[in-house]
Amino acid sequence: MIPSQKRHTWRPRLTLAALLATCVMPTAFADDAQIQQMQQQVDELEKRLLEMKAQMEDMQKKNKEIETKNNEISNKNNEISSKTQQLEGKSQDLQAQTFAISGKFKAIQDQWDQIPTTNKNQGGFIMDGVTLAFGGYLAEENALRSSNLQADINSPFSKIPFNPNPGNVLLTAPQRQEAASGYYNQSSFNATARQSRFSVMAQGNADKNTLVTGYYEMDWLGDSPTANGTQSNSYTARVRHLYTNIDWADKGLHLLAGQSWSLAVLNTHGITPRNEEIPLVIDAEYMPGFVWNRQAQVRLVKDWDKKYWAALSLEQSQTSGVAGATPNGVLNNYTLPAQAGGLLTPGNYSVNKFPDIIGKLAMETDLGHYEVFGMLRNFDGTYSNANVTAAGQNSWAGSVGFGSVLSLIPHTLDFKISGLYGNGVGRYGTSTLNDATIGPGGELTPLRGGSFLTGFLLHVQPTFDIYADIGRDWNNGYTYSSGGQLYGYGNNVLANPGQFVASAAVAGYTPYDLNSVTQETIGFWWAVYKGYYGAAKFGAQYSHTGVSAFSVRASQFGGAFTPYTTDNMIFTSIRFYPM
């Protein structure tokens, strides 16, 4: 083919190729752009996947860290739980120890709280494991009496003078005129500080269940034969209480040995020392109707959950008095004089071979405290009569008593009542009436009698209390007939005119056979100050006391009369309790 022909042959082909290129290339270019776009998207997704993978790895790492922390926290919690259990165990041990200590403290506090306000002091210190607590008060007190008892702050009620004039047929007119200047018609005033008190109590635990207490209390009412009120008032101190008490808490047993209030004294609750219901009066002789003695004794007490109590006490015995008229030749020697070297104050002491035996039962209820007791006493002597000379004899006498202390209105009004009735009980009444008389054969015959006391205590304010009491001591007497005459102790016993001389009537202590002593009293105590430095109190008391004797007859004067006398007394007291 010629060259020109060849050029003509390729021209259509080129045209076709150009046409195809025109149709195909845009499409190819479009597909490639899409691919690039898709590739970019894939790259972005891969990048995001890598980022998410990195985030997931980071989250996994953090989760592991959190898991590790949780494990550490769990371990710490386990340690805390273990230590908490250990602490709980130790806490329980501490609670048990605290409970034991608080139990011991409560036992001490219960006893300490019952110390009468007049004997109590909150101060104290610990020395070698023993707690020493001091108590007491300083007092200035005054007594004003309508008749002269020649007495200090205590009133010997059975010695109140009788009026020698009205109805006294045993005195002649001149004697009655002389007697009119006697003690009955003379009032008296007495100021004193002798009832001030001091006490010390030592307490320690022998073991976890045993509390040992020693207690000493004194005042200055000792009656020294050389003391007087003229210038120095040098009266001596005396022992009020001096004893040891042991409490076994686990056994409910209590042992007291030494001088303290008699078991016959009413308690406020339970039967424990320093827990007695003592009249709030200022008079140091308390008041008629109050059953008491302070004497040496050995006492054993058992309690059941501090609710029920039983006690037995063996106590010092003495016969307070034997009086009455006897036929000629009938005698009884029931006392002997103290001998030198016997460490007894000069004077006569009764012959006693047995202690006074007292048993008591007590119960605590929601209403208050209740108790009953019984007492046995023995009277010894040597008697003589027309057929017997100096023969020994003894007589047993029994009596029963009761008492209760109730809170009628809690923290506002309290009520008390107590009593004693039986044979030979004169010594246990405040008035100390005679215990016995001499029987027809010369034997000691215990007199039947008793004591009764009741009263109210009103708590007006925490610092102001008012009390009102009435009490009575009495005996029924015992008489017998011999040779047409009446003898013994009681009504219409023939009097010995020789005893009723003017000098006796001047003193007012005429030898009547006393039948009863009754007193009504009212008073108050005001705590003027009570704080860090102790307490200062002012008290006042008024009492009216009546003494009645059995009727007396005297054939010489052809008549009979019944003696009766009274005394009105006012007391004031200023007391400072140092702590």
Image (tube, rainbow, N blue to C red):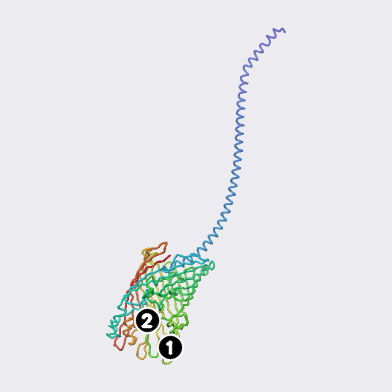
Tag 2: Cα neighbours inside 10 Å, few (<14), some, or many (≥20)? some
* Left or right, 359 with reference to 27: left
Describe the element under mark 2 as helix, strand or loop: loop
Residue 97, horizontal then vertical, whole percent: 53, 62
Q: Residue furthest bottom?
A: 387
Label 1 sits on residue: 383
Tag 1: Cα neighbours inside 10 Å, few (<14), some, or many (≥20)? many
Camera-nearest residue between 216 and 307: 216
Does 535 sit above or below residue 297? above
Is any part of residue 287 visible from this angle?
A: no
Disc 2 from disc 1: Cα separation? 23 Å
Label 2 sits on residue: 476
| Quadrant placement of the C terminus | bottom left
Amino acid bearing label 1: Tyr
The image quadrant that residue 376 belongs to is bottom left
Disc number for residue 514: none
The image quadrant that residue 45 belongs to is top right
Does 432 sit above or below residue 441? above
Precedes in sequence: disc 2 or disc 1 = 1
Residue 498, horizontal then vertical, whole percent: 33, 87
The image quadrant that residue 17 belongs to is top right
Asked whether the residues under the numbered discs 2 and 1 touch, taking CB atoms below 8 Å apart as contact, a structural biologist would say no
Residue 447, horizontal then vertical, whole percent: 40, 82
Amino acid bearing label 2: Asn
Camera-nearest residue between 421 and 471: 471
Camera-nearest residue between 507 and 423: 507
Residue 303, horizontal then vertical, whole percent: 49, 70
Q: How many marks?
A: 2
